[in-house]
């Protein structure tokens, strides 16, 4: 698929996703506006992203700091109301770069990373909102704090480092019932008094909304398949 054809599909795709969000929210007794759509634009070129912006989308998600640095400064300069979420793993040596560019960092998962973020925030004055990533499936290949350790990390971030932790994020294991993982994340958030739940992607965001998601991260349902590497 060419960039032009991908861009031409974005407005209709975006409208369909927003309608599905509203429907799922209504089933949960909430207004569709209570759920924030984060359009996952990783690997998609600026012209495709601009199609979503033109259709009214204002929140986007990227996986890599380096890719975001090349793509987003001109877009954010042109559209100051854009908000950018980091949804991929964050290396400690990229923290300062990340907090200057991203408005929300969803991937805090260790005390060491939290300490680095706190130090960088003190030095730069930048304070993006933070979410704690919980590895609800305890998958060794995935980032995220283990569910049993989540309460301790949340307390450390808020009480020891005074970080602006707003909520939690998870990515359920492929092939498992996502509702079980969404319910677990919701319970961890509830007992820690956190309001934001970033959960649900293209394949399962309606389920996530029924379990209280306040943010859903949707990529392929809006932008289509990701471009092939090098293409």
Image: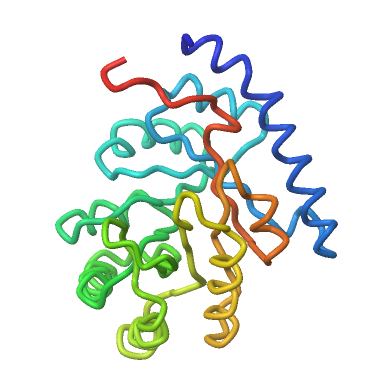
Q: Is residue 116 above or below residue 14?
A: below
Could you say which is closer to the camera, residue 147 or residue 86?
147
Q: Quadrant of residue 147?
A: bottom left
Residue 59 drawn at (x, y percent): 55, 45
Residue 166 drawn at (x, y percent): 51, 72
Is residue 25 shown to the viewer in this render?
yes
Could you say which is closer to the camera, residue 210 or residue 130?
210
Q: Horizontal placement of 98 versus 137: left or right?
A: left
Q: Quadrant of residue 138?
A: bottom left
Residue under the image location 52 percent in, 37 percent down:
219
Q: Horizontal placement of 142 versus 22: left or right?
A: left
Residue 61 drawn at (x, y percent): 46, 44
Q: Is residue 156 above or below residue 8?
A: below
Residue under the image location 61 percent in, 14 percent down:
8
Residue 155 drawn at (x, y percent): 39, 88
Is residue 81 shown to the viewer in this render?
no
Residue under the image location 43 percent in, 24 percent down:
46
Is the C terminus in the top left, top right, bottom left or bottom right quadrant?
top left
Could you say which is closer to the camera, residue 203 or residue 104?
203
Residue under the image location 33 percent in, 86 percent down:
156
């Amino acid at each position: 698929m060419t960039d032009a054809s991908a861009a031409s599909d974005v407005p209709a795709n975006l409208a369909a996703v927003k309608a599905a969000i509203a429907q799922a929210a209504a089933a949960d007794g909430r207004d569709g506006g209570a759920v924030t759509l984060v359009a996952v634009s990783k690997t998609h070129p600026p012209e495709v992203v601009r199609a979503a912006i033109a259709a009214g989308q204002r929140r986007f998600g990227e996986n890599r700091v380096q890719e975001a640095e090349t793509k987003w400064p001109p877009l954010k300069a042109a559209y100051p109301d854009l908000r950018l979420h980091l949804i991929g793993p964050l290396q400690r040596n990229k923290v300062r770069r990340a907090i200057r560019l991203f408005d929300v960092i969803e991937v805090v998962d260790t005390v060491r990373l939290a300490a680095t973020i706190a130090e960088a925030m003190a030095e730069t004055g930048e304070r993006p909102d933070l979410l704690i990533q919980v590895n609800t499936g305890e998958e060794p290949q995935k980032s995220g704090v283990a569910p049993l350790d989540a309460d301790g990390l949340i307390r450390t971030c808020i009480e020891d480092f005074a970080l602006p932790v707003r909520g939690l994020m998870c990515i359920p294991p492929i092939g498992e019932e996502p509702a079980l993982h969404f319910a677990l994340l919701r319970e961890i958030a509830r007992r820690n008094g956190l309001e934001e739940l970033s959960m649900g992607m293209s394949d399962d965001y309606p389920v996530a909304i029924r379990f209280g998601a306040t943010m859903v991260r949707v990529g392929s349902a809006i932008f289509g398949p990701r471009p092939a590497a090098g293409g």
